Amino acid sequence: MARFSFRQRGPLEEYTRDLNLTSYAPKITLEGLMTGVDNVRHDVHLSAKFTEGARQYIFRLITRLGGVENLAKEQPQVSTPRTGSRILTPQNTVESNARRRGIPGPEPPPQDLKRLLIDIHVAALNAAKLENNISIDVLSRLAVLKFLRLELGNQFSQVVERCLVRVKAIENPKFGAMGDADEMRQRFASLQVGKKPLLRKVAEQLFTTILEVERETLSKMRRSLFDDSSSEIYDMFLNRLLFTVDGRDDYVNAERYVMLGNFFRDPDRFANLFAICRDFLKAIGLIAPDDDEAPDLLLSSPANAEELFGGGNPDTETSKGRSQTVLLEMLVEALERANVMDHIIASYECVPMLTQYPKLNPQQLKNALISRSERRRVEIMLGEAKQSDAPLQAALRRIENCRGDERSRLAGRFFSDFVRYNRDRMRMNAAISAMDMVNVISSEKLRQLSTINHTLYEFEIGEANKAGEDRVIHHAVVKADVRDSTRLTRTLHDRGLNPASFFSLNFFEPVNGLLAKFGATKVFIEGDAIILALLEREHQPEFAVGRTCVLAKEMVTVVGGYNENSTAAGLPMLEVGLGVSYQDSSPMYLLDGDSRIMISEALNESDRLASCTKGARRFLSGVEGLFNVYTFQILDEFEAGGAPEDFLVRYNIGGIHISAAAFQKLQQEISLKLHEIELPTIWDNELVRLYSGMVPVGTGLFHELVIREGIVAHIDAQNFDLKAWTDMRYYEVCTNPVIYEYIQNELTLTQMRPLPITS
């Protein structure tokens, strides 16, 4: 351990006793999975549609960024007039001048790869949900990353091989003069020499696409299906170092962390800097001298940089900030004595010059800011290339003027960047170790062997299970019932309006527009009601209840939009009540000629849930509040005998009442988070239970649902006075935006601005 002898500042405990450091050790575990045919790794087969599409995308990206599209494209084979032998022929007649000069063509659209990634990972998430094991999805992520990492090198080799064939064809004397042959040979040589920077660009494009897919689609869908307990594992997959060699890349380090030395003689190489930081923590008493495990754990938690040094800019107005200032001064001392502070400052100063001097090695630039001899060599190179050395000289002046607080700030920044780099390095190693436990099978023989032994995890896209695609296993039903349609029809007649067109334009037609979006089918329609069904098929999770609830919510929105317009036009308003029911089996059908008539218990139940008892409506007609569905039990009649369900009174105006079975199925379909808050209801403030979750309704599209769990109240049938609470529950899909505002922002009751309760 280095023996730091810091300038005397008093007992170190004064500066470290208030610190709360955290430890971090990345780990990926795969639980509940079968091992494959080798009894060690897990066998995975990725869809051929995905693997072939990803290979083609990477190949095209390499040729485009490498400027060898015309060299690498596959040439048609033709027979020579004399011998009939088949040889490759260059197609100079169809190549544009720009392509022949190596000017990059249009980049392969990232949507190609994005679509494939979404499809393969959504298939994996669905498979994980069916087995209720998130490790299946983690396995798929590891397999896809392992495949993409391997294909970077494989496809570069394919491009080189294709270009080599073309160059040999160009040099074939049978074709005579080839025009730009020298220029093509030069581009082929540049491709080989520039392998490392080219693959860096391709890797950056791959990583950016993976990041977009995760943020736009997968993270939302995963939270919809599971809770957030595995989020730390998925963070490990969003790591640029996974597409580098051994986690070392000067450009990635310079742009994202801090550029370190590469050679043993460099004082700022990783091992040396880690030892300096480790010994510093030991010297100030935060790590025991003989503790070899704590350094890795503490130096991989970025929060510790803020805790120790205030991110390089402590608040000196606080006691903790003053302690951080002292610790930061001690860190600068340690870095200065280890002769690395100048290297750290130079690393940050050379970052903007990487784009100004793209042909210079990053380490060359950094060393030019430290060493006079190296600076002289760089100045000569710039002179030969006729490039100005003004940016280099400006950086030198800034380094010379870097003193005091600025030096301390950079030391604090370095510690933060270094800890982040160490964390991501450890994450990379953990991910690679987990990938080593995954066998991505490409051999058909091994695939068959693993399938026979029931040890293969297959993730297919675009290849539906034909045997089960028509078999319906569950279904959900939603009924929308227009309230007081007889009075509404009479009112329209009295005003000389057409009731048929009124209902069609303002209710039925807008609802018809929602059917395709949710995959719903129309079961029944009449003047004042419509019944829709969503069918869930085997091996194809469709989130039947969740999508039905979202459909019902959008139907309420349709009616609400009409009512806003009708109020301004002086037309009568629509009042609806919706009921959602679920049956854990397929519906049955009767045939009436060519028409099929659905038979299902869910139909009758949705009718009851959509209903509104006249007495309840009369009592609550003047009430405005956050909720639209209530269920009561008539106390006197219940005491006289009978089943509790026989004496239920329902209120449903503009609400969505879902059955208990539907709510239980929804809990299986998506991950629901419980919220408990005191809110105003009918009689007084109550502790209301709300469940929130995200329902996938399309690729990358999610809709938030909030479900209220209400308690059935015993009431006096004469005046609706509350007598007691039962053990019965009912469930409502919330439609009031104020409720969703609470869920999104976790607001308190006083912040929610609820609608007033009046009666």
Image: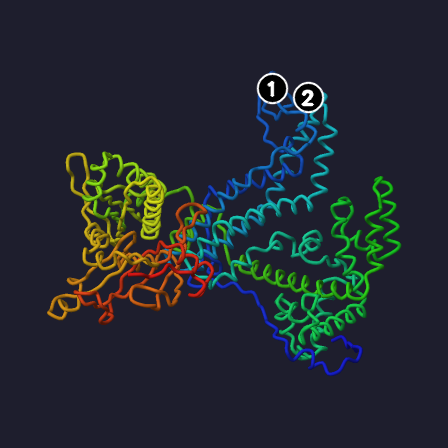
Name the one closer to the observer, 506 or 247.
506
Which structural element holds mark 2? Answer: helix
Q: Label 1: how many residues lie within 10 Å, few (<14), some (14-19) or many (20+)?
A: few
Residue 570 location (% of width, % of height): 31, 41
Determine whether, in the image, residue 743 is placed left or right of residue 200: left
| The C terminus, quarter of image | bottom left
Name the residue tied to disc 1.
Answer: 80
- Amino acid at circle 2: Lys
317 sits to left or right of 757: right
Residue 128 visible in the displayed image: no
Residue 423: name its quadrant.
bottom right
Q: The residue tagged with tag 1: helix, strand or loop?
A: loop
Please state which of residues 250 and 181 is positioned toward the viewer in this rendering.
Answer: 250
Q: Quadrant of the N terminus?
A: bottom right
Cα distance between the residues tagged 1 and 2: 10 Å
Given contact means CB atoms under 8 Å apart, are the residues at marks 1 and 2 in contact? yes
* Amino acid under disc 1: Thr
Say whether disc 1 or disc 2 marks the residue closer to the N-terminus: 1
Seen at 46% across and 41% down, the residue is 49
- Does 184 sit left or right of 130 as displayed? right
Mark 2 = which residue?
A: 174
Query: Going by the picture, which residue comes out furthest to the top?
Result: 82
